Amino acid sequence: MNGFDSYRNTPPGATAYQEAAVTTQSKGRLIVLLYDGAIKFMKLAIRELEAGNYEAKGRYIGKAQDIINELNAVLDVDSGGEIATNLRNLYVFMNNHLSEANIKRDSGMIREVITLMEQLNQSWKAIAG
């Protein structure tokens, strides 16, 4: 054993620190991190699509959709009112658009979702500070 977490190749304790850092972030900052992750996965999906690696493209789209589904699931429409309802509608649109992009192998449709998510992410970054 080399003293590193063999799965992540990180020093002992670093994994716990990373997990603690994520769990102590503000909700707004966590949303930004989720948006960043979904955007990253969509960009990777485009890269794989353009390389003709359709299996990997599908996996990355699925990962982005998982994040979008989680963002949608935690929305509190009762407390959030119209804003939460509008976000829910956007998340449903994004998910449907990504499903269609996956089937059609259409990078332009993925880029449209990236653009929407980047715009939302800028708003969350402003809120989260």
Image (cartoon, grey):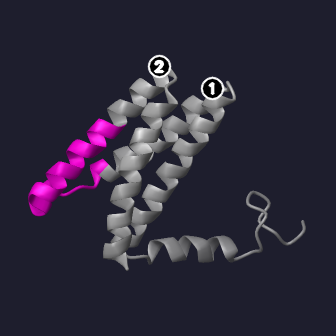
Give the residue type that dot 2 points to.
Answer: Lys
Q: Determine whether 118 is above or below 18 in the image.
A: above
Looking at the figure, which quarter contains the N terminus? bottom right
Is residue 26 shown in magenta?
no
Tally of numbered discs: 2
Q: On the rendered structure, is 35 left or right of 18?
A: left
The residue to which callout 2 is attached is 104
User: What residue do we see at 35% from left, 48% from top?
Assistant: 116
| Amino acid at the residue labelled 1 | Glu
The residue depicted at 44 percent of the width and 58 percent of the height is 34
Name the residue tied to disc 1.
55
Number of residues whose C-alpha sits closer than 10 Å to that of mark 2, classed few (under 14), some (14–19) or many (20 or more): few
| Residue in view at x 16 percent, y 58 percent | 83
Q: Position of residue 51 (x, y in %)?
A: 69, 29
Badge 2 marks a residue whose secondary structure is helix
* Residue 65 in view, yes or no: no
- For marks 2 and 1, give the CA distance: 13 Å
Q: Compared to 39, does 128 lie above or below? A: below
